[in-house]
Image (tube, coloured by chain):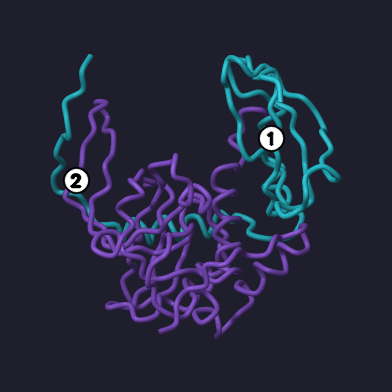
Chain colours: A purple, B cyan
Amino acid sequence: MPIFDTGRWPSIADRDDLKDVISRILDAGPNFDASFYQAGAFVGGFACQGDIVRLSSAAPCIDASGNAIVTDVTFNHWMILGNTCDMHRVDELRSQIAPLVGLAEPLQDEQLRALRRYEYSRQFYVPAWPDAAEPKHHLVDFMQIVTIEKAAFREDCARVVARLQFPAWALLHACLVRYLARDDGRFD
Amino acid sequence: MSLDAAFVTYLSEATMGPSRFTRSPQIRTIIVASIATSETPLPEELSPVREIPTQGPVVRRDIASSTKAVVNQLRSAGLLQVREEAEVMVSKLMADNLPKATMSRPLKPRTK
């Protein structure tokens, strides 16, 4: 059975290298979906940044009164946003995930093209992954990042169902950095 | 390494942001250094570029500038530039597709 490649990815040396890698996804055209995820099934090993995990859970939140709450909205899939190196560290017990919001079909061609240009800052588009029970377009919502105990990443709980290819991971990484580091205008 | 300083190195994606920032009272200075890539052996390429005091009560302008440099790298590469029209379209998609909560349950009342 093929397994995900868990070897170390190559470094990105400079701006031109970054552009080249990310463009492999942005300019993939009809090969966009095929260029996004690794083939194969997850059969062990540790979870990585960008992995999509099957986990039915609500997103806890601190409400307007300062109380920790949970709503009746349950998400079925989440993306790991925590660094892969922290997933590997025994002294770090937690990581971060964000929920995937499924988009109703059908999307207009213009909408899909825009989603695949990643010219928006608070969400991250992902296509349907191989062998998805319900193939859908999804948006990872950076506005609902949740802390999770790493021990939950196991076959019977937060099970990995898809892993990004290197260019898709580089794209995610750039979008995450852009989301966290975008100018807030305080020093203008 | 003394407790007076800590090296912060870039684990770079061709970005300029410090990978870690600590406010430990024992550490009074952070020396921000850059290496070509995370795979590069440290000693030959390490070149401290500036020192940043850690005692300021708020994030300082120079740190904000470092993080802004990340976005500038993307912008100068012509990548992932945010467009208002795209933001509006995605916001509408989220509003149309994000399930609406019908109830919420407190996990534990806040203690004052």
| Residue linked to disc 1 | B8
Quadrant where the C terminus of chain B lies? Answer: top left
Q: Nearer the viewer, mark 1 or mark 2?
A: 1
Label 2 residue SS: strand
Q: Nearer the viewer, residue B44 or A132?
A: B44
Q: Residue at x 61, y 36 (%)?
A: B20
Q: Chain of mark 1?
A: B
Q: Position of residue A97 (x, y in %)?
A: 39, 51
Q: Residue at x 24, y 26 (%)?
A: A65
Quadrant of residue A41 within the rendered picture = bottom left
Residue at image mark 2: A71
- Determine whether, in the image, residue A65 is placed left or right of residue A183: left
> Which residue is depicted at the point 59% across and 48% down?
A177
Kindly identify the amino acid type of the residue bearing the numbered disc 1: Val
Which amino acid does the dot numbered 2 rest on? Thr
Task: Give the side of residue A75 with respect to residue B80, left or right.
Answer: left
Q: Is residue B42 visible?
A: yes
Circles 1, 2 touching at the beta carbon (< 8 Å): no
Percent coordinates x, y for residue A36 in the rendering: 52, 74
Q: Secondary structure at mark 1?
A: strand
